[in-house]
Amino acid sequence: MVSQQVLNALGIGCTYALVSLGYSLTFGTLRVVNVAYGEVFMFSAMAAVGANAVLPHPTIVVASALLTAVLLGLGVHLLAVRPLGRVSDVNAPAHLSVVVSTMGCSIVLQNTALALFGGYPRPFPHIFSSKAAVLASGLVTNFGVLVGGVLALALTAALAILLRRMPLGLEMRAIAENPTLAGLSGISVPRIELMTVAISSLLAGAGALLVGEIVGTISPFIGLQYGMKSIVIIVVGGARNPIGTVMVAFALAGAEVLAVALGFSTYRDGIAFLLLLLVGAGRSVRARRSE
Amino acid sequence: MLQLTEVGRRTPGTRLRRLVTVSLPTRSIVAIVGPNGSGKSTIARMIAGLEPTESGQLSLVGGGPGAVSELLPAEPPWDRAKRGIFLLPADEPVFEDFTVEENLLAALAPFRLPPQTRRGILDGIRRRIPLTDARAGTKAGVLSGGEKRILGIARVVLLSEAAARARNGLSGPGYRLIVLDEPSRGLHEGAVASVANLLKHVAADGVAILILEQTQTLADLVADTIIHLADGEPDHAHSTATDDRKARGIA
């Protein structure tokens, strides 16, 4: 029973990890809070459901989710983020206006999804296997959890290597730290920003597939839920810190599963914000002590 | 080569204009010396593409007889860099969050270089600027002001070498220009001398160098031409090395 719960937590942790990883990449590199990211994630899950209704083939389902994520991610960036200018020009109002403009995008996306798919949860097509996998010890799990665990670990490692070792990762970090100096060093800031958004949207798409696989149902409201939790995970785990992000994602999932197991399922979605409060309080206490 | 024609800042409300007309041929070192607020950084930022050229003209003049000159188009800094024009900014010479090594690697990142060339360029810079080797793993942010400046100079030299050899770098004549805004700020005397030595080698390698300074020390050591931007200077500050020596002799 206990190990069954651990398995559940791992499954949910994988979904949080993937979605937050993508979010932290744009947030850390472009230094903007793109509120519409959660809706891009939701929409690509809905696109997978839609594609499955028309052409139920795994490749089509996966491709439509990933493609939708990248196209919408780039669309939101070009429409609502780039025209407002670089936020890291120490221009506080621009920061706020990106939040507002992307919030506009997310309202449009959510309502479009509502109009297209309706507001009720829809069953997600099982891509990997419709059968539940029974592990050696007799634990029952969705096969997606296994695939998801491997996928989440692999993508985390890939992202850490990209940021630490690859030229593109260096360029992304350079833009995050000092866009002016990056530009003077021959780094094409808009081009690297687009690539960052594309990669993080791909992660959103992968996260969407995984959430569908593990949770089993999808509704147009999951964008807000996952988006908010991702923001908490990034703030606690540290932007541009893939390993910290993933660790917090699993910790949050563990806490949620524990709460449900203890009978507090009503408060499940509030735990993220409790975590944020605790960490915030802890940080301010530590800051005051070191003064 | 790059030709500056009446470039500079027009101070509104006064008749004072500090405009510079000078050409920056390959292998030459030109210094513009003037106090704070005389428009040196404005000139640097215009050349690097950080600011539009509001007054005066920047033009590229071809070499040889019958040379054609074309206006340097308005373009962002990264396109200037692809053209071989680099700036060391005065206030933020390095990526503070990066290690010394990462600062060097970031300068090479945008250029497509064969691995061997890449290693050669890095080894060359480590040999000529020992700091980049000795403190490779140190965060640039904890370096002293002078050390940051030297690392910044190492970065622009690296950039100009990478641009010259990259497959996606310079197209056309291969003109390279390094603009250094306050390169000797925070440096002690010995360091200024070694920077001077380095710059002479870089220039001899086929690079044009423009130095913008508040003090004369580095300019005296390396510049072929020194232009003074001082209060009460006439409309057009245009001088050559000999003019300059005469002027200082009288003073």
Image (tube, grey):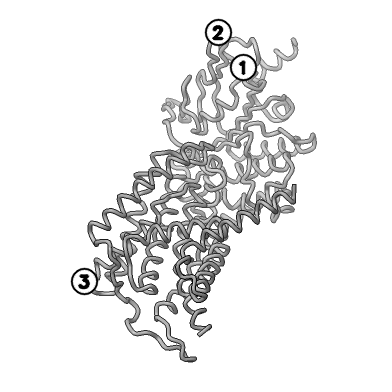
Which numbered disc covers residue A157? none
Q: Secondary structure at mark 3?
A: loop
Name which residue lies at 61% across and 19% down: B38
Q: Which residue is mark 1?
A: B239
> Callout 1: residue from which chain?
B
Q: Residues within 10 Å of mark 3 (few under 14, many from 20)?
A: few
Identify residue type, mark 3. Answer: Leu
Q: Position of residue A172 (x, y in %)?
A: 51, 52
Say if residue B158 shows up in the picture: yes
Name which residue lies at 43% across and 40% down: A97
Which numbered disc covers residue A55? 3
Q: Which residue is mark 2?
A: B15
Front tag of 2 and 1: 2
Check the image and report above or below for B233 versus A262.
above
The CA span between labels 3 and 1 is 76 Å
Labelled pair 3, 2 in contact (Cβ < 8 Å): no
Tell me which corner region of the image, top left, top right, bottom left or bottom right, holds residue B152: top right
Labelled pair 2, 1 in contact (Cβ < 8 Å): no
Q: Secondary structure at mark 2?
A: loop
Front tag of 3 and 1: 3
